[in-house]
Amino acid sequence: MTEKNVETNSKDNMKEVVLKYVKLMKDAMPPAVSDKVGPALEVVLPLLGNAVEFIEYSIPYISLGYHKLLQFWEIIKPYDPHFLIPAVFGIILCFFGGSFVTIIAAVEAYR
């Protein structure tokens, strides 16, 4: 079996496992609740399957982004990034236009 086939099978299996558990949850509900929730679950099941596929597909990219962020942090560490972060935040606030004062007030209220 090739690596690509293993990847595809694991994704299909995860989607099937999640859908199976949701169906088991529906079957375990009392009839009064199942009558009300059942139709909604039938509508949500395909969306839930797609969400599971999307999350599984995006995990390697999230991991890669996290590792790149850690590398970037190590690069800027000698420049005291704890002082750099408020400066970058201030520059970003400059582009908010009319809500600039509101955001400053919210930050100060939080402090």
Image (cartoon, grey):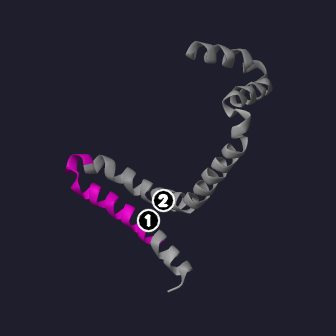
In percent of width and height, residue 18 lies at 38, 61
Residue found 58% across the figure and 61% down from its top: 60
76 or 47: nearer the eye?
Answer: 76
Q: Identify the secondary structure beneath mark 1.
A: helix
Which numbered disc covers residue 15?
A: 1
Quarter occupied by the C terminus: top right
Q: Is residue 21 magenta?
A: yes
Please say if 50 is above or below 105.
Answer: below
Residue at image coords 34%, 64% = 20
> How far from the left and from the top, in percent, is residue 43?
43, 55
> What residue is shown with label 2?
52
Q: Is residue 54 above or below residue 104?
A: below
Magenta-drawn stretch contains 98: no
Q: Secondary structure at mark 2?
A: helix
Residue that protrudes farthest toward the bottom in the picture = 1
The location of residue 38, given as percent across then percent down, is: 32, 53
Q: Are marks 2 and 1 in contact (CB under 8 Å)?
A: yes
- Which region of the structure is painted magenta? 12-33
Of 3 and 10, which appears nearest the observer? 3
The kind of secondary structure the magenta stretch mainly shows is: helix
